[in-house]
Image (tube, rainbow, N blue to C red):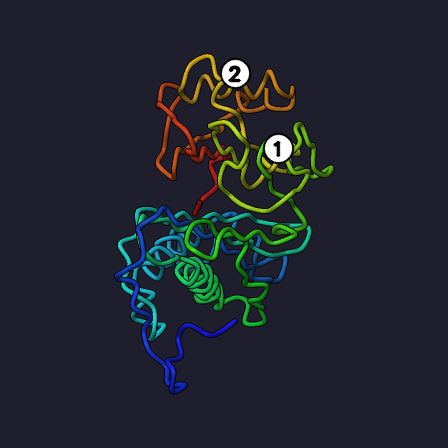
Amino acid sequence: MSLTHLNARGEAHMVDVADKPESRREASASGRITMRPETLALLAEGGLPKGDVLATARIAAIQAAKRTHELIPLCHALALTKVSIDFTLDEANSCVEVTATCRLNGRTGVEMEALTAVSVACLTLYDMCKAVDKEMVIDAIRLEAKTGGKSGDYRRDEGVGGGIGVAAGVTVVTGTDGPIVTGQGHDGQVAVGSRCDIASPCIRVKCLAELRERLGVGEISVPLSDLTRHDVGGLKAALKALDPRFAGLDEGRVLCAVNQVMAGDRTPITDDDEVAFFPPVTGG
């Protein structure tokens, strides 16, 4: 195996991708910032002096992904079609887990964009919280999955916080009581990834923040064919039919976003959409 960023003389250079075919490429990365429990509580309550912490970190991460080529010398300037940033407040481990997913149709991958987004999100969280906690630690920044391109797909063996993803034909719920596998891949393998990897078209569902702890469910892939109608209301009905714990989606003021845009029960959804359910947390 050779390093593509070195030419025949061993000099660093930008790889020419002009002759590569365009394909859909996606990458997911994760990381975390650990802090004092009281700092995490202030973050969750919106009590930090700089204001809306998670919203600021999300915008910073999106900007960083789009400007990765200005930070990493040999990266190409890419026309990203999607940058998704998720935060999970982990009270048990006193940290904020950060996940970034980048996507495009192009000639080169987006791993560096996803990793840069996670890094800058963590740095922004540090900046927003450092007035009350200078001992925060940023670590575990890593690539979780990538798809597309000549090198093929990649899945890390374990997910963020010990969770697991899915292989083709598998539906896995990652919850506080461990994973619930409701299907099996054609090759018997379990892999990590944020995309719908079951054989049929599907919707990616996430339960975030306190809702994740209350329902005991983190992520699940739902086949599109299980929906009686292709909107958020239809998805809720399919989830409740799958597992009674999802009845909690109708309790209180649970909010919903489709591809990080606020949504209601009549919002349409389609294959590979990401639907997140979450409580009204300040800064989220």
Amino acid carrying label 1: it is Val
Please provide percent x and percent y for residue 271. 41, 29
Residue at left offset 47%, top offset 30%: 203
Identify the element where label 1 is drawn: loop
184 up-or-down from 6: above or below: above
- Please state which of residues 10 and 205 is positioned toward the viewer in this rendering: 10
Q: Which residue is mark 2?
A: 237
Mark in front: 1 vs 2: 1
Quadrant position of residue 251: top right
Q: Residue at x 55, y 47 (%)?
A: 88
Q: Earlier in the sequence, mark 1 or mark 2?
A: 1
In front of the other: 162 or 88: 162
Where disc 2 sits, the SS reads helix
Residue 14, percent from left and from top: 32, 73
- Label 1: which residue? 170
Q: Residue 248 versus residue 241: which sits nearer the camera?
A: 241
Tell which residue pokes out farthest to the right in this image. Answer: 177
How packed mark 2 is, by other alpha carbons closer than 10 Å (few <14, some 14-19, many 20 or more), is some
Quarter of the figure that contains the C terminus: top left
Q: Which quadrant of the view contains residue 17?
A: bottom left
Q: Are marks 1 and 2 in contact (CB under 8 Å)?
A: no
Q: Residue at x 59, y 39 (%)?
A: 167
**Residue type pointed to by label 2:** Ala
Identify the image quadrant of residue 269.
Answer: top left
Could you tell me residue 173's position as x and y percent? 63, 34
The residue drawn where x is 53% and y is 27% is 222
How packed mark 1 is, by other alpha carbons closer than 10 Å (few <14, some 14-19, many 20 or more), is many
Q: How many marks?
A: 2
As measured in the structure, the alpha-carbon distance from the residue carrying label 1 to the one carrying label 2 is: 20 Å
Q: Position of residue 31 (x, y in %)?
A: 54, 59
Q: Is residue 196 left or right of residue 90?
A: left
